[in-house]
Amino acid sequence: MKDLGCIIAGVESINPFWLASAPPTDKKYNVERAFKAGWGGAVWKTLGEDPPVVNVTSRYGVHRSHDRTIIGINNIELISDRPLDINLREMEEMRRAWPDRVIIGSIMAPMDERAWKDLAIKVANTGVQGIELNLGCPHGMCERGMGSAVGQDPEFVEQTTRWVREATDLPVFTKLTPNVTDIMLPACAAKAGGAHAISLINTVNSIIGVDLDNMTPTPTVDGHGTHGGYCGEAVKPIALHMTAEIARSQETAGVEISAIGGITTWRDAAEFIALGASGVQVCTAAMLYGFRIVEDMNEGLAAFMREKKYRTIEDFKGAASAQTVDWNALNMNHDLLARINPDACIECGRCFIACEDTSHQAIRIDAKPDGGRLFSVIDDECVGCNLCMHVCPVKDCITMEAVVDDRPYTTWPEHPKNPLRNAAE
Amino acid sequence: MRHFKLNTGSADLSREDIAHNFSDLHPPLEPAQAVVDAARCIYCYDAPCLNACPTRIDIPKFIHQIRSGNIEGSAKTILSANIMGGTCARACPTEVLCEQVCVVNHTEGASVKIGDLQRFAVDHLIETSAAHPFERAAETGKRFAVIGAGPAGLAFAHRAAMLGNDVVIYEAKSKPGGLNEYGLAAYKMANNFAQREVEFLLGIGGIEIEYKKLLGDNLVLDDLRRDFDAVFIGAGLTGNRALHIPGEALNGVRNALEFIEVVREADDKSKIPISHNVIVIGGGNTAIDAAVQAKCLGARNVTLVYRRGPEAMSATEWEQDLAKANGVVMRFWAAPQSFVGNDGVKTATFAEMDVRNGKLSPTETTFEIKTDLVLKAIGQSLEETELAGLKIENGKIVVDKQFRTSLDGVYAGGDCIASGEDLTVQAVEDGKQAAICADAYLRAPPVKGAAE
């Protein structure tokens, strides 16, 4: 699958699928299994200064959908708890044994120039193709002035990025935390510090659930719990938005994106790439299903590209970026009406009750001659919100039909009902 | 489709084989299975399944409650509409009721397992809950008599008691449950479920049962009318229809319901003597229950003979398939003409049937089947002689929309009225509604002369 080859911040990769810095990349044994399975690269689990951290038990909690599928994991594990020299030796061995695969070294330190530079140099000497700065862990490490405690302060983001740039010639990936009010602030800081790429998102700060029998947050450590880092399918929308904002902003032009956040299938990866990511990193999906999931990521993405006639990833990278705009740039004169296909309708009533109770009372029920129920849309009430289409369990039974008229593309700033329109003119 | 251990001719079934055959027809869902199947429910609004249920159980709600982990609440949702939700989950022909109209049939090719999920929830409550889930309203001081401790009578009694009335049930047999106890295949009601359910139902309080009380024998309707504020007749159809053909009185020609009762009441089914050439006559679920249970006991040859085609059988397609899958030979378009034998029946003669001028009639062609046991499952009839004074039409007690008979203060429901299909679920609905009507009437009797 040569056509999946790509270059991410100057690092060549046989495919865009890397394992993110996390438990799956903690040691040689795992990374070797990952490469055998077909992963293009691995960002090694974050290394800190010796002595290594000590972890607690237990470490994970999960968020399930109603069919018991896990849609999110929350973890309170810290960075690598193995001695630095063992990790460095294994990284070097893996680089030599797998020349066509990517290994990125991930590092974390407090706000201390010497610490960052020492770690960067030691990691660079193993032969890795790039260095990632972990500025994101929202639990544990931040209480020691590391992780998100650094990533939440744009000055610190710029400073640490610059230190690592000064210490090595390798591509530098600054990994950001989503636990900020505006992702553009740390993203711009990373650029100012000289980052070649931004990796995002790290985990979302969260409490995943409460054990109502013992009245403790989960995961529970001897009767107590703490907030942790949330990841998996459920965080994908947050990551997509942050990717899109950085990719389409002129302020961060030139900085590449290694996207992370709930990527589970090839389709998820394609969406991130369409919004401007150069490659993706995966953790939770591998933790839930094993490294074999990369097989269909590769095959599915290649099939998608064949179908759409994209020769390389570059051909559709950022293809959705121009269409991602501010709300103020949307056309106020665009109208849709829901259409319910009675032949496909199974008469479950979900569209009706959703519209009736929570939207615009735009669906009516009539008795059919055969005793069934006929659902139809009251055009005058329908605002084209899509809710009925989404709750309908039958694919393509409810469609949204564009109202064709000759009204021009009109944005809110231009709209006659905008009280500030004249003031702006 | 369940496959029982069958007697292939080499040796009779072992005691273990027979015990296996009479274990649960549909094993209960494991909790994980229940959650997965509950998640398949679309949670329809004004759902077709709810409208297909004679007792109008809020099925989307109870399934949603299983999904949310509120299993006891789910059971309460079921039982508030149908206090015999446990039996109905086991014995209802869901394939022609709720599950037939489930919209998931259209999206996934198979319905949500509504019956199995209902059983999951109700069994959970009955097995784990110490207290009865419903409370009685303030006492009304009214006393209701009920004739028959079958599904209709018990449902009436439970609802009447819940509304604050006291109830005495008079039952002809020595155990409660009616056809739930005596008339359903044993593998449908495994582990003595009918009795466990009645015990649960009586947990509401305010209900007494007197056994061995038979109308026309040691029970008089007029006495009950005198002694109680209202009377509910849920006596079922206890008469056996006859074929009126030669040889019907021979030994070995029996009613299928009697056979089913013997099987149900035997603790060790392997001790039941079984014939090897069994004929079952009829086309309903009772015929299927008799035929399949005969196979379960180890009968080598079981032939079910029905006078019309398979589409006319009141047994559902699923029930017919269960019989076929377990070696019951089905003969259609044939009716018995005579039974021959010295002491016991040896041969049954059938005429092939066809429809001439719109009327089902025997043809000239006949055939014989060797037999030592004939089970008649040709329907039950009302014992009218004991119901003097009540208006009866087409073999059913006539009631109005409030379940009132032609006699003041006398209500009726279940198989003895013409409310719908002769199903447990319909009997439960009749009993429940009749109790609500009787209670409301006694609380606010209409003023004489005023329009009702």
Image (cartoon, coloured by chain):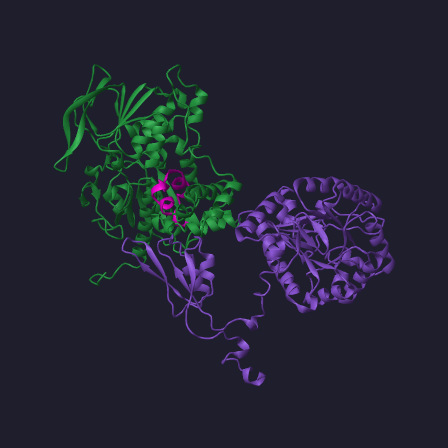
Residue at left 78%, top 67%?
A155
Towards the viewer: B180 or A58: A58
Towards the viewer: B15 or B235: B15
Outermost residue to the left: B357
Q: Colour of chain A?
A: purple
In the visual, does A293 lie left or right of B138?
Answer: right
Locate residue B65, reporting x and y percent: 49, 50
Looking at the picture, does residue B345 appear above or below residue B292?
above
Q: Locate residue B396: give its quadrant.
A: top left
The quadrant the N terminus of chain A occupies is top right
Q: Which residues are magenta?
A: B80-101
Q: Does A312 lie within the magenta span?
A: no
In the visual, does B362 lie left or right of B215?
Answer: left
Residue at left 30%, top 52%?
B438
Locate residue B428, reporting x and y percent: 34, 45
Q: Does B83 lie within the magenta span?
A: yes
> The chain coloured green carries which letter?
B
Locate residue A358, reporting x and y percent: 46, 64
